[in-house]
Image (cartoon, grey):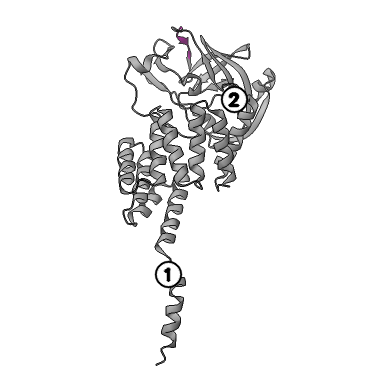
Amino acid sequence: MSSRPAFVLMALAPFLIVPATAQTTLTADLLADLLLKDEILQAETLINNQPRTALTVAFRGEIEFRRGHFDQAETLYREALKMDPKTGRAHFGLGKLAMAKVQAKQGIQSLHRAIELDAKEPIYRLYASEASGVDKDYAQQRKQLEEYLRLNPRDEDRVAEAKAGLEILKAFESQDIGEVEAPANPAPIRFRKSLNLIFTSVMINGKGPYDFAIDTGATQTVISEKLAAEIGLPLITSTVVYGIGGSGKVETKLYKARELVIGDLKVRNTPLGTFNDPLISSFADGILGTSAFSDFVMDIDYPAASCSYSASGRQRRPAPKYFPFGFSAICCCFRWRSTESAATSLSIPAP
């Protein structure tokens, strides 16, 4: 038998066998893609079939983070860094955790370290832009958003959010976005109870008052398209958001508001999303999200129909160890006093 086929196979072997480094890269890319799509179970199944490396341990931390198991996530991120201090995914995770604990400087440091180690990973740029916004470093926020888009990520919704973010920064220029003014001891905000929801009065650019549903599950304050037109708010751009009125993904227009007034609280230079749902418009002019109270600890006394807020409450009262953090997320703590059930997250059932 000729030995020629054996020589041919030996010559082709480098092309037939996928190098380990290439296989690792393919697995990492697939894991990152699954996590971007929130396919947690699929990502976990894939990791279970991989060797235990610094990168796979960091990805396990990502999965625990998504599940809200923050202590386990931190343990895994730190374990990954012990295995390899240059694991960008682990630094990224620690950055998110720091931001969730309202530790902006530490979060920015970890996120920038992740970028140094893997400058071509788009999601690191997006989270770094959010962290820079929290730190009110708008020049750095703009830079990170531009870099994110330059990397041409395959994520249609986040790309739309990033483009909208740049338009918002352009619209407000050097102004502090969401600047809050409140007295040392603000009076409680009175609210009304109806339809198992709570409502309060809001002034916009000196006009109103308008009826807004308070939704502690919403990070974005939104108003009806009709009201935006009546007030004459300047249009910034359009983007995609999730969950307005319990709906899925919807397109929304963003408008520039000079000032919102809720009781003694004033919020200046803020973008407002919009909805165009006749059902919601029939009972509310808008939905007040948590961003208006991002600097405060809130006490919502449902039986007394009042909401008090305190900027110094973080030092006086125990607060959650972690706050939700992500693109467009807001750090805020709500505390409830209730002797009866209350729906705080606005959800409109389908007809």
Amino acid residing under circle 2: Pro
Residue 285 location, x and y as percent?
Answer: 59, 20
Secondary element at image label 2? strand
Looking at this view, is 47 or 115 the one in front? 115
Q: Is residue 251 something one can see in this rendering?
A: no
Q: Label 2: how many residues lie within 10 Å, few (<14), some (14-19) or many (20+)?
A: many
> Which callout, 1 or 2, points at the residue further toward the start of the chain?
1
Q: Does residue 191 sit above or below 161 in this rendering?
A: above
Q: Does residue 160 sit above or below 21 in this rendering?
A: above
Q: Quadrant of residue 8?
A: bottom left
Residue 160 location, x and y as percent?
Answer: 59, 39
Q: Quadrant of residue 50?
A: bottom left
Residue 238 location, x and y as percent?
Answer: 64, 33
- Residue at the image position 48 percent from the left and 8 percent from the top: 183
Q: Which residue is mark 2?
A: 271
Q: Which residues are magenta?
A: 187-192
**Horizontal placement of 128 versus 322: left or right?**
right
Secondary element at image label 1? loop
Amino acid residing under circle 1: Ile
Q: Is residue 343 magenta?
A: no
Of the 4 image quadrants, the one containing the C terminus is top right
Whole-number angstrom distance, CA of label 1 to CA of label 2: 53 Å
Of the 4 image quadrants, the one containing the N terminus is bottom left
Q: Does residue 16 sit above or below 306 in this rendering?
A: below
**Horizontal placement of 309 versus 200: left or right?**
left
**Horizontal placement of 164 versus 305: left or right?**
right
